[in-house]
Image (cartoon, rainbow, N blue to C red):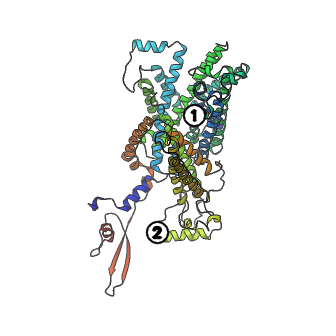
Amino acid sequence: MARWLPRSADLTRFCQKLNRVKTLEDDMMETSFNRCLSTIDLTLLGIGGMVGSGLYVLTGTVAKEIAGPAVIISFIIAGFASLLAALCYAEFGARVPKTGSAYMFTYVSVGEIWAFLIGWNVLLEYMIGGAAVARAWSGYLDSIFNHKIKNFTETHVGTWQVPFLARYPDFLAAAILLVATAFISFGAKVSSWLNHVFSAISMGVILFILIMGFVLAQPKNWSAKEGGFAPYGLSGIMAGTATCFYAFVGFDVIAASSEEARNPQRAVPRAIAFSLGLATGAYILVSVVLTLMVPWNTLDPDSALADAFYRRGYAWAGFLVAVGSICAMNTVLLSNLFSLPRIVYAMAEDGLFFQVFSQVHPRTQVPVVGIVVFGLLMALLALVFDLEALVQFLSIGTLLAYTFVAASIIVLRFQHQKVDAPAPAAGGRPSPEPREGPSTGELKEYESFSDKLQLVDRDKSKEHREPGQLKAAFEPYLEFLSDFYPGEVVTVAVVTLMVSAVCLCSILVFGNTHLHLPTWSYSLLLVLFSLGFLLSLFLIWAHEQQRSTQTFQIPLVPLSPALSIVLNIYLMLKLSYMTWLRFAVWLLLGLLVYFGYGIWHSKENLREPRPQRVSARYVVFPSGSLEERVQAVQPGSQPAAGLPDTDTEDSKR
């Protein structure tokens, strides 16, 4: 029976395959895409992804039902929390200017299977998000015409009562997606120009809302007579923050477009900062004027802004609000359709997804196959499926991506940087110095103990310490950590930090409700998991990290990414159990695709040299001495006659 069990060496090799990282080219600016996007183009793409229908609907909903006028504080906190994730994307987008966003960032620092699962979840997130926005766009336009489109469809096409299907087919939503798909397939410049038009109209309407809103503002609407500024207290503000956080989802379109930016090292961080700042300002200011125009407890959650102007005697302003809302939803549609095919392209280009999606049109220089296929799938979703039950899935995919990107920042920051290859010697042979890995800073794997000794001796002889090594100040107290490879302790500490964060947030979310823990155990578990989190953070900080590079770097590492990880995990655990169930099913489907196709066609798999078997042969002389002869045997070769194969003997033991 033992002969059927896998050997430990095989299991180790299999785990190494799952966690191998992507090898980047020396020239990361080389691409088959068209590098034509400026900082302004990227900024408007980010604004279009964040300032959608949420500005016109979410502000009124949170103010009326969750936080009151204190929705302003909720947006400020949510904006700061989003900034932590956005800065992680900014650093990666500048250092790794390749398309793929969170998928690519995870692949170059954490490992292949994790990157695939992130990309797999983001894929569904964009599909559902685009289809949901298209249905909202259709419903909003239909409401302007007194639901004539809906009534016509139900009368002449019919309705159905089938689980997971919409009550009636939404042809208008499918049509707008097909039109948007056609425009996106014309190239990045056309997509950017179209986004400029809709973003300009949307920002013009927002400017009108702010000016008119401050003119019509009545400070008495924040008075105690109307319930005060924070009628729901601190709990209402924090609950509003959790909802408002999702309003800022969309800045990752900038990172996904970094391979089409002219100067990504400067443009990507600036565009993320500008777009997030403008979006946060827009949400805060609109919330201020909305709650000052009319009492917060009389707001209409479905059309708060239009209703507020109507009640103040400016019914005509409702038309402008409707135009702004439709244009804002158009920019979100373009953002989804722009990002999704590029992430699929990155996965296909790496061999983890079907190769047909890696084709780039020679004239438009966009992944036209991915654009058309996923545009059609998105249109089909919007046409027949009931998306309300699936909308929460958007949150878990986004938060999981944010979590892995934050963890990737810590891992990458404590790895070796790529150094220029030494000049060849006079004889044309390169220096025997062990070569470091690709631009991710991944160190070459040392196969022998003597290599490891040379590495240790070389490091000790250096005055300056490499990234991932223990800081000199802590060496007398943590000397036992000096024996590990640079970066090994940090990687283990990051895993421990994430596990501690999951346990800590689970106690916070479920401790008093689902688990019904007594006070003493609740407090004890909080203290234990908090200590585990802080200890992991300290171990990471006790190691050297990469010195400042020419590209943008997020400040306060590892603290900033660690805070982002805790926040994202906490928000994920607040989602419903049905969302987690659907998420688990989708993950299982993704694992089937990965183990059925991706792991075999991965370019990293093809790049790996075939391992040679090393077999030890022993000859016993009459004197009793033992001589070891090490021989490299190619797979399939036979042992020398008369000599036992100790590799087989060891496996039997």
SS for tag 2? loop
Q: Residue furthest bottom?
A: 623
Q: Could you tell me the amino acid type at mark 2?
A: Ser
Q: Could you tell me the amino acid type at mark 1?
A: Ala
x and y, in percent, of residue 104 in the image: 52, 46
Q: Left or right? Give the position of 44 relative to 183.
A: right
x and y, in percent, of residue 158 in the image: 38, 15
Quarter of the figure with the N terminus: bottom left
Quarter of the figure with the C terminus: bottom left
Q: Which picture quadrant has residue 357?
A: top left
Disc on res. 239: 1
| Residue at image mark 2 | 448
Q: Earlier in the sequence, mark 1 or mark 2?
A: 1
| Above or below for 506 versus 336 | below
On the question of residue 383 being in view, the answer is yes
Q: Left or right? Give the position of 416 relative to 12.
A: right
Q: Which picture quadrant has residue 213?
A: top right
**Mark 2 surroundings within 10 Å by alpha-carbon count, few (fewer than 14), some (14 through 19), many (20 or more):** few
x and y, in percent, of residue 107 in the image: 50, 49
| Above or below for 339 versus 154 | below
| Above or below for 187 versus 548 | above
